[in-house]
Image (spheres, rainbow, N blue to C red):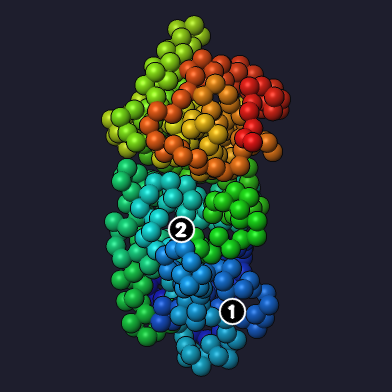
Amino acid sequence: MPKVTDNWVDWSYGEIPKTTLSAHVTGWTILDNVYVLNGSFHIVTDDPTAFPFLREMISSGYEMKNGKAEVDKQEPTENDMVIIDPQEATRRFGQYASRVAGVSFVSNDPPQFSGHYYHFTAEIFLGLWRTYSTLDQDITADGKTSLPAPTRLIMPHCPHDRNWHDKAGINHIVLRAAFPSLTFEYMSDWEERALTGRPVIMDRVVLTGRTTAHRAKNFSIDDKIGAVACRLPASPHWWTPIRRNVVAFAGAGKLPPPTERPVITYISRQGRGRSLDPKSHESLVKALRELESKYGYEVNIVVMEKFTKLEQIWLAARTTILIGVHGNGLTSLLWMQPNPSATVIEIFFANGFASDYQVPARDVGIEHYGVWNDHYFRSMSEHKPKRHQPRGFHDKGILAHGPTIAELCLQRIMQPERLASKMDGVKQVLPS
């Protein structure tokens, strides 16, 4: 830990510490020895060509809106970030800067999407950790890593903490469970630093912004900002430290014990906007109960809102197959333990498809299948449907054939590897 006397960096008798680029893909960047003055990041270097274009690292923090004039407002200016040489840095800063020690996660997003479980935890937080984890590509299967925990999360464009507290109330639990010592800074804190008129040097910054990540080459392939971060090299176990910390927090210091009994969890959305046709719901419940009776599987039919937040995380961590209509509850897939049978089965309106949960499932090592009534398809294959939300996609009355979903559950449990490799033919329908 830094000492009280470590709060200055003084280059009166030497060279100013230069900024280095430790990792980068568009929208996700790690900078070491980066300076901040008047609310603007300053990269100090003799070689500006060693750094990406500014627009590939940062945006203005303006909300995402349609229309060229609105999009243009997202472009960064010198108020957001500049690249300067050491001579100019000394002219601006003088001979010293206050030190902000440790690792700072910085989300340059406005509040627009931050107050949502999926958009914050499964995109922003997942992407920040994935970016940071590229610095330790030897993370072990049990989650051991050499990386120090991040010290703070800075959200310069969020006025207060409620901007990232989701309706479900899980975002803040996830962060406090993953990193108990993490502190939070918001717009007012960022402005207070700027008002001092003094420069600071930040040891390490892991920086992201939604509109910046949208500029990534081939972004449209997955259409998800977290997928861009996952282009960085990483250990196959990169998510394990986060999963273990969060699940152990939910379990009061314990992880779910190993079990040979598969657990199938169906998240019911009945009585809410996007939900199954009542007969389809009954058909699915009946088919799953038959699996329970015949094979001894544990089957849970749940309404997540009736569980505490920690109970939701713990249930997901015990679950082998997670089933649900397209919706926020499927974000719980992040806490599932990867294994050959671990699967998310997402029920869509006929011929509709969205990659919101398919992408993070893939990135954390969980299989994903989509269901259209009595047909299913493996979303991880090259034959996955294109994103499409036809009329009725968000409505009640979605059809689902219970026995078909039960059959898929059985095959995933009994023969997951064969199914994953040969699944491009069984009961598969591709959109026209």
Residue 143 x/y as whole percent: 54, 42
Residue 417 visible? The answer is: no
State the residue position of label 2. 150
Q: In this view, does 298 lie to the left or right of 420?
A: left
Q: In this view, does 35 lie to the left or right of 45?
A: left
Which of 95/175 is in front? Answer: 175
Q: Do the residues labelled 2 and 1 touch (CB within 8 Å)?
A: no
Which mark sits nearer the N-terminus, 2 or 1?
Answer: 1
Which numbered marker is on residue 18? 1
Which of 295/266 is in front? Answer: 266
The Cα–Cα distance between marks 2 and 1, rounded to whole angstroms, is 22 Å
Which of 327/140 is in front? Answer: 327
Q: How crowded is mark 1: few (under 14 residues within 10 Å), some or many (20 or more)?
A: some
**Identity of the residue furthest to the bottom in this view:** 91
At a point 56% along the width and 16% down the height, the residue shown is 407
* Residue 226 position (above or below residue 282): below
